[in-house]
Amino acid sequence: MADGRVRVRGREGEEVVWSRKAARRAGRLTNWLDDLDPSEDTIFPVEETCATVLRTLGAMCDDDWSVSCLDECSLTQLASLIEGASNLIAEQALEYAQIAFACRLDGKCANELRELLGALDDFESDEERVAALAEPAFTLNSPMPQHTAAAALPVNDDAAEAALGKVDVGTLIELKGLNRAWRALGRRALCSRLCRREGHADPRQLHEITELNLELLIEAGRPSEAARAGRLLHLERLTGYGFVVDVAAVRNVDLVEEEDEEEEEEEEDNEWNKELLRGPAKHALCSCVTGEGEPPLKLLLGAIACAGSGDIRGIPVEQMRAGTLTHLNLNSEEAQHGYGIGPEGAMLVAFVLPVMGSLTSLNLENNQLCGVDRVVGRGTYTAEGITAIADALRVNSSLTQVLAFCHPEVPLVLL
Amino acid sequence: MVSQLGLAYNLLCGIDENGRGTYTAEGITAIADALRVNSSLTSLDLENNQLCGVDRVVRGTYTAEGITAIADALRVNGVLTKCKLKENQLGVTGWTAIFNALCDSPTSKIVEWDLRYESLRFASLEPEIAKPLAEYISATGSLTSLSIGDYNLGDDGVEALSIGLKESKSLATLDLSNSYGMMTKFGPKGAAALASAIAVVAGSLTEVCSDPQTTFSLYLLRQYASRFMLTSVSLCLLARSSTSAGMTLARRVQSHWLMPFASIAPLRRCASRTSNACSPCFHAQILACCA
C-alpha cells in the first residue's frame, strides 16, 4: 500500500498485487481504499475469486493492458473473469470480458455452440430440442427452476447471465438448443434483454410481460415474435429504434385504406403506389407511437403484426395472427383492389407467416413484390419484401408442431 | 407450415413484361437460399418473372445469375416436388443449369418439368438442350412428367433425347405438343428414334402427347396400333379435335385403335387444352391410318 500498490488476497489465500490505478477501476476496491487509512498496510480479501483471476483482472484494469490478451483465454476462463469483475464491480474489465465472450459465440448455430461450449445434450428427444429452439423468444423459466446456471457455466447464476450480456439475441436463442441448463440460462438472458421494463420487476410469468423490445427481435431476424407476442401476451408497449408503441391504441386503428376518387385517378395516371401504409391509416398508426421523428417502417409493421386489427390492403393480419388459416390467396388479380401488396405488404406477410401453423398454401402472385409494376415497369426495385418472405421460409417446418402448443388456450410448457 | 407458395408474375428480377428495367438477382437469390434450408415447401411457382432478364420476345440482356442460384438450391433441396419455371425464357443455358444440378442431386424429388412457352428466338440453340435433358431423364428416379413441345430439337436433338428416354426410371408422361400451335420440328429420323425409345419404356411411360400433324404422331400411332403398348397415346394426337366433327373422329379412332386400353375421359381433357379445330390434314392422316 505504501508503495502505491494494493494487495488483494484470493480464495486460496494467495496474494495478488494491483496497481493503485487499477484498483481505482474496481468499485469495491475503490470503496475500500476510500475508507482506509493511507498509512495502513492491509490486504483486501476477495474470498469468492481465485488468485489467477484476480491477477488477470488486475492487469485488465491497468493502462498498458491490451484486449488481445484475452485471445488465449478459454470460454470458462472468460466466464470466471466476468464473475470476478462482477464481484469487484470492475466495469471496464467486465465489459472487455463480456465482449470477448460474445465474439466467440455470436453468429453460431446451436450445434456449433454445443461443441464450442462442451455442453452435453440432455434433451430427452429431438422434439424437445427443436421445441427449445422454436419456442417464443420471450418464454420464461418456471418459477421453480430445475436447472441452475452453474450447470451451464462454472460460475454463479448472476455471472452466468452477465457472461451473456453482450451476446446477440439470435445467438441467445440458439443457446437454448444446447441442453436444459443452457435453455434455462438463455431464457433468463432473453427475458432480461427483451422484456425488462424500467421501474418494474423482471416478469416471472407470461402475463407479467407488458413490454417487448421489438428492435432487438427484428434485428435478430425474428420479427415474427411480434405476432407471437400479440397472440400470447398482454402487452402494453413495444419499444425499439428510440420509439415506444402503445399496443392498445394500435388495436383500435382502422387499417383499411380509404381513397377518394380523385386520389385513385391520380394514382392510375401517374405511378403505382407501393406504400402499404399511407393516408389516414398511417396517420392513425403513427399517433400510437411516441418518439422523435418518423418511426421506422419495420417498427410499424411489427406493431401491426402484433396488434393490428382487420385487414390492410387485403392482408387479413388479424386472422393470420390467430394462426387458423389453412389457405391464403393474396393474388391481386383475384382481389377487389387492382394493385398488389407490394414489398411492404410482403414484409408484413413475412412478419406473421412463421406463426401461421395451419397454413399450407400461400398465393402471392401478381403483387409487385419487388416494387416494379408488371406491364409498364413503373416503380423502383427493392428486394426487401421478397427477402423477408425468403427469411420466413427459412424457419424450420418443425416450428409448426411447436406453435401448436403456443395457442393462447394452451399454456406454454415451462420447463 | 406452407407447402405451396405462388410467386408468379412478380418481376422478381426487376425486368417487366416488355423487357424493360435493370436486372438484379437479389430477390431470386434470397428465395434460392431459403430453398436450401426450407423443409416444408413442396410446390413453388416462379412463372413469368423474367428470371433471366429477357421477356418473351427476348428483349433485354440474358443473364443466368438468378437461375443458376435456383439450380444450385435445387441440387440440395430434397422436399420440392414441383418448381414451376415456365415463361421465364430460361433458354438452353438456364435449363441446362437446372438439369445438370438435378443430375448430381441425390435428394431431388422433383416430379415434373414444363418447358413450354419458351421463346422461339432461342431456336438456334434448342437442340443443345437435348443432351443434358437426356442425362437428367436417365439419372433421376423422381421425374414423372415432362413437357418439352415448344423446343425445336431437330432430328439430332430428338435422337439424343431418345437415348436418355430409353433409360428413364420414372417418366410416365411425355408431352411434345406445342403451345404456340406450331408443329414440333423433327423429321422421320427423330420420330423413329423417339417412337422406338417409347417402346422400350412403355411399361412406365403411359401417356404420350404430340401434335396431330407430326410425323412422330403417325409413327406412334402405327406403333400403337400394332403393339398396344401405351394406355392413352391418343391424348394430344386428338388435341385439336374440339369440334363435334373432331370428337366424332376421336371416338372413331379410339374405337379402332385404343378401345382395349384408353378411356374417353383423357380424350376430353386433352381436347379442352386447345380451341383449334381438327385440321383437314389431321383428318386425312388419321383416316389413312385407320384405313
Image: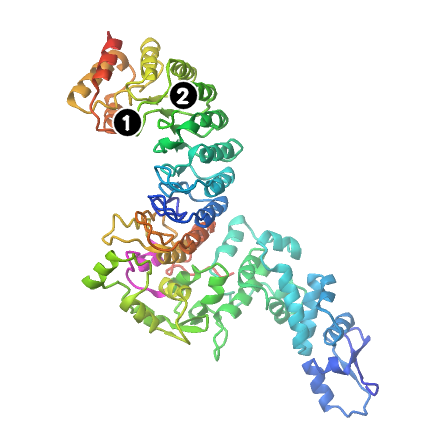
Above or below, A52 relative to B121: below
Q: Is residue A134 magenta?
A: no
Q: Position of residue A147 (x, y in %)?
A: 59, 63
Residue B181 circle label = 1
Image quadrant where residue A178 sits = bottom right
Q: Where is residue A385, by image quadrant?
A: bottom left
First to last magenta residue range: A307-324
The N terminus of chain A: image quadrant? bottom right
Q: Position of residue B3 (x, y in %)?
A: 39, 44
Is the magenta region chiefly helix, strand or loop? Answer: loop
Q: In the rendered view, does B275 fall on the left or right side of A342?
A: left
Q: Is residue A397 visible?
A: no
Viewer-nearest residue: B37 or A274: A274
In this view of the protein, which residue sits in the foreground, A41 or A26?
A: A26
Query: For this rendering, which residue is in front, A268 or A14?
Result: A268
First in sequence, mark 2 or 1: give its number: 2
Name the outermost residue toward the right: A3
Kind of residue indicated by mark 1: Gly
Count residues near mark 1 (Cα–Cα under 10 Å), then give few for <14, some for 14-19, many for 20+.
few
Residue placed most toward the observer, A138 or B219: B219
- Chain letter belonging to callout 2: B
Question: Could you say where residue B247 lies in the image, as x and y percent from the top left?
Answer: 19, 21
Determine the secondary structure under disc 1: loop
Real-space CA distance between mark 2 and mark 1, rounded to the nearest whole angstrom:
17 Å
Please, what is the three-letter code of the amino acid marked with disc 2?
Gly
Q: Is residue B10 left or right of residue B265?
A: right
Q: Which residue is mark 2?
A: B154
Other residues around mark 2 within 10 Å, as few (<14) / some (14–19) / many (≥20): many
Q: Judging from the image, what secondary structure is the residue with disc 2 in?
A: helix
